[in-house]
Amino acid sequence: MAPDTGAEVVLRLDGITKRFGPLVANDGISFELRKGEVIALLGENGAGKTTLMNILFGHYTAEGGTVEVFGRALPPGHPRAALDAGVGMVHQHFTLADNMTVLENILLGTRPLLSPRLGAGAARAKVAKLSRDFGLAVDPDARVGNLSVGERQRVEILKALYRDARILILDEPTAVLTPQESAALFGTLRKAVAQGLSVIFISHKLGEVMEISSRVLVLRHGKLAGEVATAKTDRHRLAEMMVGAEIAAPRLSDRAPGPALLTLSNVDTPRRGSVPGLSGVNLTLRAGQITGLAGVSGNGQAALAALIGGLERPVHGGMELHGEVPGDWSPRAALAAGIARIPEDRHKTGTVSDFSLTENAILESYDEAPYSRKGWMDWRAAEGFARKIIETYDVRCPGPSARIRLLSGGNMQKLILGRVLEAGPKIILANQPVRGLDIGAVTFVQNRLIAARDEGAAVLLISEDLDEVMALSDVIHVIYEGRLSPAFPRGTMTPAGLGQWMAGHGFGGGAHAA
Amino acid sequence: MEILDILLTASFWAAAVRIASPLIFATLGELICERAGVLNLGIEGIMVIGAFAGWMTVYLGGGLWTGVLVAMLAGMLFGLLHATLTVPFGLSQHVVGLGVTLLATVTASFAYRLSLPEVTSPPKIEPFQPFAIPGLSQVPLIGPAFFAQTPLTYLAFALIALVSIVLYRTPLGLALRAAGENPASVEAQGLSVTAIRMGAVIVGSGLMAIGGAFLTMSAFSSFFFEMVNGRGWICIALVVFGAWKPGKAALGALLFAAFDALQVRLQQTPMGAVVPYQVFLMVPYILSILALVLMSRRAEVPAALMIPFNKGER
């Protein structure tokens, strides 16, 4: 149980249970929140964190259990009641109307609908004061659609504070922020706590949890798996509680590189809008090797991924696949050449949200046996394949006929991984394969990529996370403004050294000669 | 230079304002629906039922304003049907809208035949008479064009301002616009998306019906089956033309009406003897399409338009 600090209990959840079809998202969860504390709700994707908070806020109705705020039971299913009781929620997906100003968004719902006036004048003063007190700088007259993600989050927090929230719930608030914005957010939260607010901080990033929380609740598979004071634990132990087992960091065995499977020599691709193209890129992907691509986002990673995935053709320079120059270059040709793609955006390009898991599993092979014969689909074979992926890759889902949008990001990525790896690819293009995933899923995906490498696949790992690139790669390139650094073998560069390249040092004035 | 001559006559502008009036009612009605996130394709049929209900009320002895009220209530009833099916039940707004149009149209025909079985040519009523506003109507050109109209036209123009104020200056308008942009934002503030959207569709449908009633009670004096004649569809385009803003949409209605008034007058010029009259009939539509293409390129569609909102769905 929570250490009794003597502070007033502001929120009490008792035995919350929620099902989505056969999936038990929350299973008898109980905990207390005290005045002036930050508790972190830690858990993997799909562990039930967001569901629990949506019940607390009244978006979902629980099948069982009660919520008490300041000693009073909240009627289930009424966000209004939660708001009036002083609960403010900053959703993972912002609940802002893009076509309205910051002030209008803050004012929404704060006055009776039929009152004749908006009360914008008084609101403006209050918002200005809150902005100052909590360090939430934002222009009240800016259109929300024009704001950056960090600014939108500040608007969301202001919305809650404007309604005099005493309990602030933040659902994965840092997932979309830059490190600087995260630091500013933590500053705001500390100010809030100092003023007597209580915070529930949902996250799967251990570093943040250690930094901001005073107590950690760990959710696993919909159950409360543990509760510890932050001061009495460490990242390693939290990670173990989260996944329920000890986590081994991914490890690369030494392995002699195989033959070159894909070679780019002096390749240029066109610029697409704000996305830079490649210029003079030389790259060799070898069998049994993971090639890491480090670089600050937006420096041509997308262009390289598009080229290798078949979406883009070189305007200049040569490309060789398995020792031959490919005739026609298209996504289909790339697939036929054994190039497997884990796309950067799994929601938009990796899956079709409203298709079932089965349909998504065969997206790239639907026109081949055994899934289609003589122009007819064999759904039984397709479903069998989906079941196999679900089992082998531990995709947690209601079943193969469920729409994939119901899955958490990690489970969605596992399905994509299964689709890609089960085809026995020769070259794997992994673009940000673990972005937004929790530790369990990260380890799972990384180990699968290493296993594929050990079986002789050439892997191109594109990531903005330098630690990840350094841990997983046999050789590392840095990409900067569409140009590629020379290949640095594993262990020859320090993070600081790579950081220099990422900032553009080392690249000559013209195209780099590798 | 016949066109210039026509543009300088007060009767031309008076006609344009008159033709624009029903379009303004219905366009504002559609705009309210769409701003809340619901496309209301029932508009064409709701205008028919409004035209019929208003006229019938007066024919049966009711007052003109009673007729307007009855028309509005009839429209709201069909709006309620549309809203029930599209908002809480989340059915396809296209299918429901077309269904409501068909149902409302045949309901009007059916009621007409039922109440006037023997009649061959529809009876006339005494419609709204022009009311010249003292002083203002004396202003050259503008006076006779804008200030010697029927009360319903004045109401239409007053509604432009009213709808703008409600949309942009009241908590209700804020919630309505948010419901059409990101319903989750409304829900997160403890308001009911369902209630707001249903209310918008019902009120919007009421306005559409008044637009229909204008035809039988102000522009003409009796009811014909084909009298709405696609005006509802024009209003859907006008909402897009106006970028979902009441003022701009009303301006679009006036522009379309001016083209319509112009083509009628062009038919009577020497040009009309040479060019087939069908070409003139096409003019307002062709110009409207062109204007639509030019104006709507940067228009911001309400982001949640036509997307049903289901509470508690992931």
Image (spheres, coloured by chain):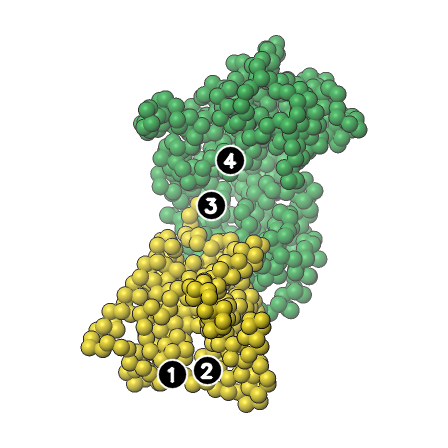
Q: Mark 3 lies on which chain?
A: A
Q: Is residue A134 above or below residue A492?
A: below
Residues packed near mark 3 inside 10 Å, few (<14), some (14 to 19) or many (20 plus):
many
The residue pinned by badge 4 equals A349
Give the mark toward the camera: 4 or 3.
Answer: 4
Q: The yellow chain is which one?
A: B
Amino acid at dot 2: Thr
Q: Which numbered dot is residue A470?
A: none
Q: Which chain carries label 4?
A: A
Check if mark 1's residue and mark 3's residue have beta carbons within 8 Å: no
Closer-to-camera residue (B170/B255):
B255
Q: Where is residue A16 in the image (x, y as percent from the top left)?
A: 42, 46
Same chain letter for marks 4 and 1: no
The residue pinned by badge 3 equals A52
Q: In this view, does B161 lie above or below A253?
A: below
Q: Mark 1 lies on which chain?
A: B
Amino acid at dot 4: Thr
Instruction: Using the numbered discs, state the Cα–Cα distance from disc 1 to disc 3 in whole angstroms.
Output: 62 Å
